[in-house]
Image (cartoon, helix red, strand yellow):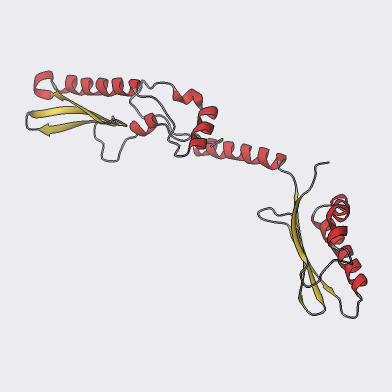
């Protein structure tokens, strides 16, 4: 929504269909019981507007011109809105692109944004978002088999930077296992982020999660945390 505005009802109204032959959306030559006419139509919330202009009475060019003029008159009186189908989306569109909601005076389709311009605007917003987004850290410790503990760390991005380690606990006592896990967690977090982040995680979460008195190696833990800015 911030990068590319949704179409307005006016843009939709002037969009040419593939079978259009007049070059003007909502204006066409029609055979009626009273004779050939140039017909102007416009769908509104109140229903479809329609008016015919006789070719026999007005002539070919004048009838077509009057149909175009009538459709332009209808469009100018039409309140311009974005075609956003949720209330909050309409608010965002109105805040970002209010200048596009001016009454329309043109019955011809507007120029489509170039693909390169669209890609550039999306990249600019993505870069700004990535720059302001705080770092994240996911740490999972779990024993899936006897005498083996799995330690997985990632930055929780997409695609994620991640590292998986396996710790052999055979012959180790409880406190020794916890200390080994704690050391491996710090090592793995340092590899994914940096040493400062590893120290922060250990002091803020790791020491509590890996308390030898409460840590259950079979249950382990899986946490996702926001890394504070420097």
Left or right of 154 on screen, residue 214: right
Q: Residue at x 74, y 44 (%)?
A: 134
Q: Is residue 144 above or below residue 129?
A: below
The answer to which image quadrant residue 191 occupies is: bottom right
Q: Residue 10: image x %, image y %?
A: 37, 29
Left or right of 149 on screen, residue 106: left
Q: Is residue 64 above or below residue 31?
A: above
The answer to whether residue 138 is visible is yes
Q: Residue at x 80, y 44 (%)?
A: 228
The answer to which image quadrant residue 20 occupies is: top left
Left or right of 188 on screen, residue 28: left
Q: Residue 19: image x %, image y %?
A: 26, 40
- The total of numbered circles placed on residues is 0
Left or right of 5 on screen, residue 49: left
Q: Is residue 197 above or below residue 79?
A: below
Q: Nearer the viewer, residue 118 or 230?
A: 230
Q: Residue 172: image x %, image y %?
A: 91, 77
Q: Residue 154: image x %, image y %?
A: 74, 58
Q: Quadrant of the C terminus?
A: top right
The answer to which image quadrant residue 11 occupies is: top left
The answer to whether residue 163 is visible is no
Q: Residue at x 54, y 28 (%)?
A: 95
């Amino acid at each position: 929504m911030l990068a590319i505005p949704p179409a307005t009802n006016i843009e939709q109204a002037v969009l040419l269909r593939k079978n259009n032959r007049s070059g003007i959306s909502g204006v066409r030559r029609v055979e009626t019981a009273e004779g050939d006419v140039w017909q102007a139509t416009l769908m509104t919330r109140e229903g479809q507007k329609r008016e015919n202009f006789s070719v026999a009475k007005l002539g070919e060019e004048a009838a077509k011109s009057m149909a175009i003029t009538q459709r332009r008159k209808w469009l100018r009186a039409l309140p311009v809105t974005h075609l956003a189908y949720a209330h909050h989306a309409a608010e965002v569109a109105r805040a970002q692109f209010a200048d596009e909601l001016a009454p329309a005076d043109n019955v011809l389709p507007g120029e489509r944004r170039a693909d390169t311009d669209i890609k550039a605007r999306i990249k600019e917003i993505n870069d700004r978002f990535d720059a302001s987004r705080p770092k994240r850290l996911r740490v999972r410790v779990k024993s899936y088999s006897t005498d083996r503990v799995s330690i997985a760390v990632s930055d929780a991005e997409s695609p994620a930077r991640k590292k998986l380690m396996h710790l052999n606990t055979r012959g180790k006592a409880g406190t020794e296992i916890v200390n080994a896990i704690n050391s491996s967690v710090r090592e793995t977090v340092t590899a994914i982020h940096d040493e400062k982040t590893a120290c922060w995680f250990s002091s803020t979460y790791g020491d509590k999660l890996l308390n030898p008195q409460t840590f259950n190696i079979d249950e382990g833990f899986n946490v996702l945390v926001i890394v504070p800015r420097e």
